[in-house]
Amino acid sequence: MGAYGGVLALSGRVAGLGLDGFAAEYWGRHQRFGVFELPDNRRYWFLMRTQPVTALMPDRAACAAAEGWPLPISAAIAATPPDALIPFVVHAKPPPKTLCALGITRVGDAAHAMEPNLGQGACQGLEDAAALQAIVAAVAPARVAALYERLRLKRVRMFVRESALGRLGVHGPRPVQYLMRATLRAIPMGLSEPRLRAMHTMPDYAARVA
Amino acid sequence: MLLATQDGAPILSRPLPDTALLATRTALQNALLVALGPDRLRLGCEVGDVAPGRVTLVSGEVLACDLVVDAGGIRAPSNTGAPPSYGGVRRRAGAVGPGRGARA
């Protein structure tokens, strides 16, 4: 199974028109770029590639590998100062069995460190905080941990599992890449959209603890 | 959200529910500061030990609390589960016996 890492960056203002909320991820073979439009016509973009654990992270020259990829990638890179590149390696943990142990409640990556493939790592940390806020306002401190785990554990385990699966379309073995891409192409919107909507919509934790 | 191949051929295209939110760590800490006030938000304190209802700083100061929440990231000391793995690498353990090396 491929290990992977790369660079990410926030670009400066990109010349030309905005992209109308455009967000895209382009999958090559063992290499992918992502680009997301931000306010002020800036971009968040990343490059991830399959690489050995000991490999150096791609530098500016490696980003030149974007030549021949779709235009939004090269435009974002061109608007990024070289010193704005942030190298990273992807680390993750298996789905958690618990979010609370020994009287300590865990949130964010301390509780559910996941691969970045759904873009939900930080989102779920914020959702942890929102859930805790609702719980603390509703129950005595001694009941907080158990209720937090009941409301959050199943959902965060799902994100950790599915984020790990997301790696396979680019960093998995070649036949698995083909299979995953074919599967994604075949999924009708009527099936995938409710699923994505449920992922992207935070449950009403205040209502659940009321 | 567009998922496409290297040459731009779509694999999957789905609408995102909302526009992106860009929030820096500084902005989040400022939000905490506004919500809690300067007397209750303490930064730059190195934690030495955490136990139920008690946090001990490296300075020796002990903080009593109703609820301890650890947001210390993937290597948080309270997370005693499996260690972080690099990019989801799965190791395959093998038997170790006389005259045999371990396979990994």
Image (cartoon, coloured by chain):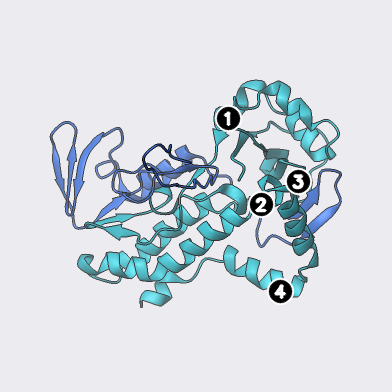
The residue wearing badge 1 is A87
Residue type at mark 2: give it. Answer: Leu
Q: Please name the amino acid that badge 1 sits on.
A: Pro
Across and down, in percent, residue A193 comes to: 70, 69
Q: Residue at x 22, y 65 (%)?
A: A141
Chain letter of the residue carrying label 2: A
Q: Is residue A21 above or below residue B96?
A: below
Residue at which label 2 appears: A168
The subunit letter for the residue under badge 1 reads: A
Whether marks 1 and 3 lie on the same chain: yes
Label 3 CA crowd tier, 10 Å (few <14, some 14–19, many 20+): many
Closest to the camera, between mark 4 and mark 3, is: 3
| Residue B3, image x, y percentages | 76, 53
Label 2–label 1 contact, CB within 8 A = no
Gap in Å between the C-alphas at discs 4 and 3?
Answer: 22 Å
Label 2: element kind = helix
Give above or below for B52 relative to A64: below
Please indicate, yes or no, whether residue B15 appears anywhere in the rendered image: yes
Q: Quick check: do tags 3 and 2 share a chain?
A: yes
Please give the chain letter of the residue carrying mark 4: A
Q: Earlier in the sequence, mark 4 or mark 1?
A: 1
Q: CA distance from mark 2 to mark 1?
A: 21 Å
Q: Is residue A96 left or right of residue B23?
A: left
Q: Of circles 2 and 4, which is in front?
A: 2
| Res A134 quadrant in image | bottom left
Name the kind of residue labelled 3 in the image.
Answer: Trp
- Residue A27's tag is 3
User: Which residue is located at x 36 percent, y 39 percent?
Assistant: B98
The numbered mark at residue A191 is 4
Q: Colour of chain B?
A: blue
Q: Which badge, 4 or 3, comes first in the chain's sequence?
A: 3
